[in-house]
Amino acid sequence: MFFLIYLRRELLRRKRQTIVGALGLAVGIGLVLTVTMAAAGVKKAQADVLHALYGIGTDITVTAAAPPPPKLGSSEGASQGFSPGQGSQHVDVLGLPPGLGPLDATAVESVSHLPGVSAAAGGLLLRDTQLDVPTVQEQSTPGWRPSQKNLGVTFTVIGVDPGRTSLGPFASAQLSSGRSFVAGDTGDDVAVVDSGYATANGVATGSTVTVAGTKFHVIGIVQQSQGGGAADVYIPLARAQALAAFQGLPSLTGRVDTIYVSADSASHIGAVRNAIAKVLPTATVTSSSSLADAVSGSLAGAASLASNLGRWLAVGSLAAAFAVSSLMTVSAVSRRVREIGTLKALGWNTRRIISQLLGESLVTGLIGAVLGVGIGLGGGLLVRRLAPALSATVAQNPGAKIPENVRIDDTGMHHEAAAGGSHTIAVHLTAPVTLTAIGLAVVLGVGGGLLAGMFGGWRAARLRPATAMTRVA
Amino acid sequence: MYTLTGVTRTYRKDNATVTALSSVDLVIEDGDWLAVQGPTGHGKTTLLQILGGLDRPSSGRVTVDGRDLATLREADIAAIRAASIGFVFQTFNLIPTLSALENVEAALVPLRISTADRRRRATQALESVGLADRSGHLPSELSGGQQQRVGIARALVKQPRLLLADEPTGNLDEQTRDEIIALLENVWHDRGLTLVLITHDPAIAARAHRVAQMRNGRLTVRSGQARTHQ
Ligand SMILES: Nc1ncnc2c1ncn2[C@@H]1O[C@H](COP(=O)(O)OP(=O)(O)OP(=O)(O)O)[C@@H](O)[C@H]1O
Ligand SMILES: [Mg+2]
């Protein structure tokens, strides 16, 4: 076809013009791709945060906010404090972490029957605090300072339903020694310990850990792939419920504090979230997209960077690239006035001439798209190489603020995050290459080419055919 | 057959009005061989543009075989040019990125003939101007005379009824000029072409059957009467 011959000749014999035109578009497209990929990376990092907290396979979690603290002087309030006495006292209490409240276990069943839910499991995320209350005599010794044991040692405990280990944080734990829970463990004092905690505290398979004053036999050591370490110690849910106490409740039997939900497809997550919120109106329902709003730390900064600055930068450079390539085509048409006039004299109608010009700029746009994908891939690599490790901090109940402790000393009032009230997870920012991103590049290249070609064609259509005869080149 | 009655073409440039053609009356019979002479800037090219439908008169009427050009749409005029009018330009106007053969082929593109046919006819046209061995050359690789012969092959390949040539030898030396004119006369003679040729050159005008003079946009036919092929 003559169309293709002419097209090829124009592009190959005006190489510099073709390359400059394609490169201009490519830079714009490459930037858009990089930003798109980085934004996808941020999204993936947010999903990683959810999975680190709640386990791979969990799409949605349900938590409840803590009820208001008991009034001072009430009988419940009295049990919160420890008064030094004559003899030494050791305290070991298992309770909910700050900010988290109990949910009725029947909610797990009702959630699991909602449409779009493929599975739901209840879990009990707890905090164990052990401390030695100093005696009155110790405290009155001159120069006495509280030791770490006096201030309290805490670790996190998760009650796992041994019959449903495929959901929740325990699901993504990799067994590194010993064995995992089996259905028969339900009522036994057995524990699986996170490798990080085990190493720090000299725990191994066969030894014991003490939770709420009860010795648990360690049957296995697990490792969390995300390194976040959702919990230090996992014990059977029924035992955790029996041993935990909360604001005057002697035990948490029949209660959980987190429900892990998996949806039957990613596209149903939003609908399932809404359905759960209807069934449990006071609970916090979290998915990876809503978690993003609850995250603080450098991940949140990266997310807003990607969505604000990055987007404007990309849109701006793309607009500039489109404008430059349109201007280039228009000026190319002006330089080819005589050629276009000659074609008209040969009997080419305006439509044929415009399609020829459009074809040229379309192919230039496609070359720009290919180069742009290259630039985008390079940009993605750069993001992966240069991105600092990000951290995300989320409240145990993502619907609430991170709970604070207020400490007053002679320099004034200090706010600090309550121990165990939040999770901090390290995530790595990636820039995944997706088919959508490649498709976007092609669309932008074609769009840029079409736009430029339309301007060029418009210019060509307005040329008087008589220009073929003008003497000036 | 062309009939021009009271054809006037004015250009407005800023506030001044230039009258390039001033009520030109002209009849061109099929098979005519008309040379147009005249000083520079006096409207010769403008006349040719109007004959070729590249430009429209400001006033007056142009009819081709009884059809008024003013009633035809741009695309229809393009189709007439594609089928039956050949142009030869003073500055050759070959498309710089296309080879000699492809330049000739470009004239056949609007006729929608098969690729093989197009190539065959273009090759023949190049042969007839003695450039068969240069078909793959780019215009920049050809001499001025060779470029103009490619231009003539391009104008003749569609076997037009009318050939409009705007100073086709103006940029060529005398020997090449004579070759080119001989070539055009042969085609005129063999194919029953209508030939309208603009020239400054008295030697060329002397060979035409009719000579017209352009002066200040006015056309006067100076010599000869419409004469067709023997
Ligand atoms: N597009 C245009 N706009 C304004 N004026 C024009 C335009 N084209 C031609 N003219 C004017 O019309 C007049 C006739 O021009 P034309 O090109 O027909 O002259 P010509 O006889 O062909 O001259 P030459 O022998 O130099 O080619 C000139 O004065 C020219 O300046
Ligand atoms: Mg002229």
Image (cartoon, coloured by chain):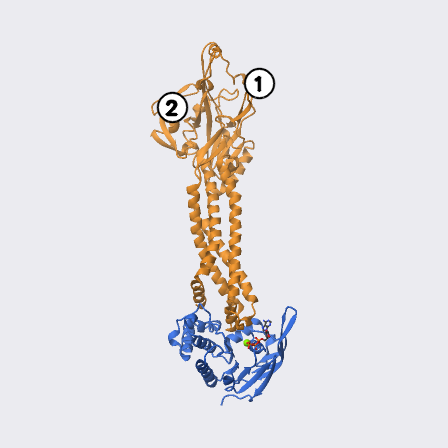
Chain colours: A orange, B blue
Residue B217: x, y in percent? 61, 79
Q: Nearer the viewer, residue A436 or B154?
A: B154
Question: Percent x, y for residue A440?
Answer: 48, 51
Helix or strand or loop: what does disc 1 sit on?
loop
Q: Please determine whether, in this image, residue B60 is positioned above or below residue A313.
A: below
Q: Secondary structure at mark 2?
A: helix
The numbered disc on residue A201 is 2
- Alpha carbon separation for disc pair 2 and 1: 36 Å
CB under 8 Å between discs 2 and 1: no
Residue A86 position, x and y percent, is: 47, 9
Please give the label number shown on residue A319: none
Which label's residue is closer to the chain start, 2 or 1? 1
Report which quarter residue B20 is drawn in.
bottom right
Q: Chain of mark 2?
A: A
- Judged from the image, the quadrant occupied by ligand 2 is bottom right
Asked whether the viewer can see residue A181, the reply is: no
Q: Is residue A162 above or below residue B198?
A: above
Callout 2: few (<14), some (14-19), or many (20+) C-alpha neighbours within 10 Å? few
Quadrant of the image for the N terminus of chain A?
Answer: bottom left
Q: Residue furthest right?
A: B15
Residue carrying label 1? A72
Mark 1 lies within 8 Å of ligand 1 (Cβ measured) = no
Q: Nearer the viewer, residue A219 or A151?
A: A151
Q: Which amino acid does the dot numbered 2 rest on?
A: Asn
Which dot, 2 or 1, sits closer to the camera? 2
How packed is label 1: few (under 14 Cα within 10 Å), some, or many (20 or more)? few
The image position of residue B155, as x and y in percent, is 48, 77
- Of residues A354 and A72, which is closer to you in this image? A354
- Same chain? Circles 2 and 1: yes
